[in-house]
Image (tube, grey):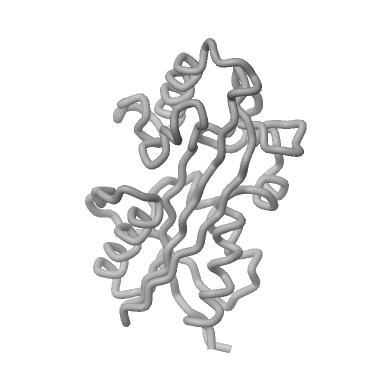
Amino acid sequence: MSTAKIVLATRNEAKLTELRRILAASDLAIELVGLPDGEEVAETGTTFAENALIKARAAVEATGLPAVADDSGLAVDELAGMPGIRSARWSGRRDGTREQRDEANNALLLAQLDDVPAERRGAAFVCAVALVTPEGVERVAHGKLRGALLNAPRGQNGFGYDPLFLADGQTGTNAELTAAEKDAISHRGRAFRELAVVIGQVLVP
C-alpha cells in the first residue's frame, strides 16, 4: 500500500501534537509533515470553515502537497458565541509564549463572566477541519463539544481554554483529562475522525 504525504497546516506545537495523535489513530497509510517556516497566513474568514480552508489552501500553495488545516475556538452562550474565531487572540496579546497568551485569554474571559451564574455559563468548543489537494479537491468536516465554563482554571494538561471547560458528562475539565480521554470526546477529535474517512476516500488508494 502506498503512503500519502499530507501537510498539517499549523505551527502551534501543542495543536500539532494533538492533530498528529488523532490522525495516527485512524490507521490510514499517511505520512504527516509539518508546515515549513514562513509568514503566518491572515485568517480573514468570518467562520471556522472559511479560516480552515484559507490555511489549507496556503499550505498547498507553499508545498505542493495535500494539506489539512483546522480552525477552532470557544463559543460562549452568554457572549453571543464569542470569542469564536477570535479565541486565540481574545485578549489582544500577541507577544510572549503560548502559555502566557493562553493565560491572558483565560483571565479576560473569566473577568467578562465574573457575575454570570453557573446556569448561564454554557459554552461549546467548535472545530472545522479542511482538506485541500493540489488538484483542487476541498472538503470540510466539523466537530463540537458542549459544556460549561468554571469560575477558575483546573488542570495542567491541554492548552487554550481547556482549564476552564467542563464538558457535558465529565467530572474533570479538558485540562484534567488524559490525552486519550480528551481525543475521544473533543471537537477536534470528532472533526478529524470524520475527515479521516474523507482522506481515505480521496488520497489513500
In the displayed structure, 120 sits above or below 60; it is above
Residue name at image x 32 percent, y 82 percent: 135
In the displayed structure, 135 sits above or below 24; it is below
For the N terminus, give its image quadrant: bottom right
Give whichever of 184, 84 is nearer the camera: 84
In the displayed structure, 149 sits above or below 85; it is above
Give whichever of 35, 94 is nearer the camera: 94
- Residue 167 horizontal/vertical position (percent): 67, 37
Give whichever of 58, 139 is nearer the camera: 139
Q: Please indicate whether residue 96 sits to the left or right of residue 18 in the image.
A: left
Residue name at image x 54 percent, y 42 percent: 125
Give whichever of 43, 155 is nearer the camera: 43
For the C terminus, give its image quadrant: bottom right
- Residue 31 horizontal/vertical position (percent): 50, 72
Residue name at image x 67 percent, y 45 percent: 182
Looking at the rendering, which quadrant does residue 166 occupy?
Answer: top right
Instruction: Determine the residue located farthest toward the top in the rendered image.
Output: 115
- Residue 54 horizontal/vertical position (percent): 30, 59
- Residue 83 horizontal/vertical position (percent): 41, 33
Q: Please indicate whether residue 137 sits to the left or right of residue 16 in the image.
A: left
